[in-house]
């Protein structure tokens, strides 16, 4: 059977707080992703060196992932989510103000690391709060996030074509964070998220092989998403002859697909078994990738990126929910480990693609995408038996 008994998703104010925190998170993610090609030009570095910004993001995520269980026990999930947003904005402002490569690498790393603790603490809270509807809540949180963040690449591209420059667009993230803190800073959800709470019945136990297989699937999903985020605009420019600033709009098409897919996926996750839905999403991504990889026409390329985004939209929430389901009731430890899997994926994926692009061209480098899709599908099939 591919369907399940439908469950109900109840959206209270606490749920909406996490949704909007994730929305603020996505404005950082997509603005820095869209800015990378222009930052590379400003600094005069190769694609592989520019890919080190993705590596810096990954290192930040890994370090904070290691610290997340301790932080949650010490100050609780509520404080962790706001601490993460504060640190994320510090990193964004560092990128905005800095021009030297070491400074921007540090900014990308700080922003990513601190943002990841907001993301994963929020996902764990949603999973606990909504129980059987946790996968749908996680998918919908990411849908709301992408809906908010979809404006970021457009704002970056627009600012790049004005006297203000692309750096001015990065102010969007701290402004939205301040507004959210002023309007919903006192909202939180009841439950075991308080500081010092025990986060699972088997805190010291080891995870099983299904958990790590689910983590490997998450690794593949995150790696391919970040390859799209950081290098799709470059391939679009190479294939169509568009300028870097205009090609950055391709990321807008991709994020529009993400938004549409995650809203639809939140509904589908209430009816269709997550493994089946995730395999279908990976197949849809493969179709979109093939069209984008072969296209020389800007309109078709934008459409292919949107289709790829629809497929990718379900990868992270469903892969993360599988990690949580395999955790044996230890969501905080599971999300911390998941952030490490994701961090390593962010480090290796874009960096490897950038190195391959320098040696063989961006189009050939994008053959990484179907390889990652095939590995993810294999992991799902093996661990779902």
Image (tube, grey):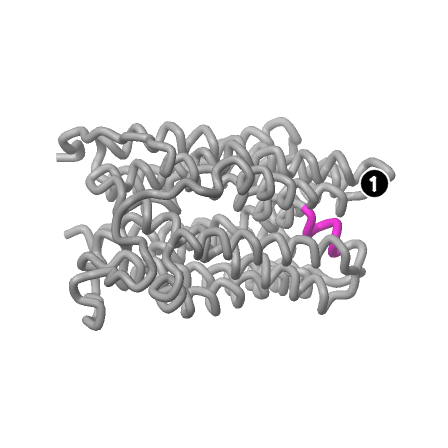
The image position of residue 240, as x and y in percent, is: 70, 37
* Closest to the observer, 232 or 212: 212
Residue at horizontal 30 percent and vertical 64 percent from the top = 196
Q: How many labels were placed on the picture?
A: 1
**Residue 52: percent from the left, percent from the top?**
63, 65
Q: Position of residue 11 (x, y in %)?
A: 33, 30
Indicate whether 369 appears above or below 284. Answer: below
The residue under the point 59% across, 62% down is 110
Residue occupying the far right of the picture: 163
Please tell me whether residue 188 belongs to the stretch shown in magenta. Answer: no
Instruction: Place residue 353 in its image quadrant.
Output: bottom right
Q: Is residue 301 visible?
A: no
285 on left or right of 38: left
Q: Locate the N terminus by quadrant.
A: top left
Give the secondary structure at mark 1: loop
Q: Nearer the viewer, residue 278 or 81?
A: 81
Q: Which residues are magenta?
A: 35-40
Percent across and percent down for residue 213 are 27, 61
In this orientation, which residue lies closer to the viewer: 357 or 222? 222
Q: Residue at x 32, y 56 (%)?
A: 194
Q: Give neighbour class at mark 1: few <14, some 14-19, many 20+ (Cα, 10 Å).
A: few
Q: Would you name the residue on which mark 1 appears? A: 164
Q: Is residue 124 above or below residue 196?
A: above
Is any atom of residue 249 visible in this view?
Answer: yes
Instruction: Decide whether the magenta segment is chiefly helix, strand or loop.
Output: helix
Give the residue displayed 45% in from the left and 57% down from the top.
117
């Amino acid at each position: 059977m591919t369907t399940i008994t439908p469950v109900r998703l109840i959206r209270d104010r606490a749920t909406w707080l996490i949704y909007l925190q994730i929305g603020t998170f996505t404005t950082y993610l997509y603005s820095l992703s869209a800015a990378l090609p222009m930052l590379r030009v400003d600094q005069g570095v190769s694609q592989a060196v520019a890919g080190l910004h993705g590596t810096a993001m990954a290192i930040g995520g890994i370090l904070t992932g290691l610290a997340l269980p301790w932080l949650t026990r010490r100050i609780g999930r509520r404080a962790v989510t706001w601490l993460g947003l504060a640190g994320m904005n510090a990193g964004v402002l560092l990128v905005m103000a800095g021009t030297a490569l070491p400074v921007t690498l540090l900014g990308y790393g700080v922003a990513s690391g601190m943002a990841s603790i907001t993301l994963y603490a929020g996902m764990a809270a949603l999973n606990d709060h909504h129980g059987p509807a946790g996968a749908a809540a996680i998918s919908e949180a990411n849908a709301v996030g992408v809906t908010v963040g979809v404006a970021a690449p457009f704002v970056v591209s627009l600012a790049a074509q004005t006297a203000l420059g692309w750096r001015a667009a990065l102010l969007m993230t701290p402004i939205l964070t301040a507004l959210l803190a002023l309007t919903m800073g006192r909202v939180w959800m009841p439950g075991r998220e308080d500081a010092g709470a025990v986060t699972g019945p088997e805190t010291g136990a080891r995870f099983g092989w299904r958990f790590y297989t689910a983590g490997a699937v998450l690794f593949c999903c995150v790696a391919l998403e970040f390859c799209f985020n950081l290098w799709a605009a470059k391939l679009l420019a190479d294939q169509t002859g568009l300028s870097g600033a205009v090609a950055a709009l391709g990321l807008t098409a991709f994020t529009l697909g993400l938004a549409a897919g995650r809203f639809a996926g939140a509904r589908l996750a209430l009816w269709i078994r997550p493994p089946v839905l995730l395999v279908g999403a990976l197949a849809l991504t493969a179709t979109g990738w093939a069209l984008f990889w072969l296209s020389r026409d800007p309109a078709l390329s934008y459409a292919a990126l949107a289709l790829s985004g629809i497929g990718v939209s379900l990868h992270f929430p469903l892969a993360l929910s599988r990690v949580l389901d395999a955790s044996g009731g230890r969501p905080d430890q599971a999300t911390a480990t998941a952030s490490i899997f994701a961090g390593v994926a962010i480090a290796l994926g874009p960096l490897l693609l950038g190195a391959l692009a320098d040696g063989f061209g961006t189009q050939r480098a994008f053959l990484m995408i179907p390889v990652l899709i095939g590995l993810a599908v294999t992991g799902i099939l093996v661990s779902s038996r």
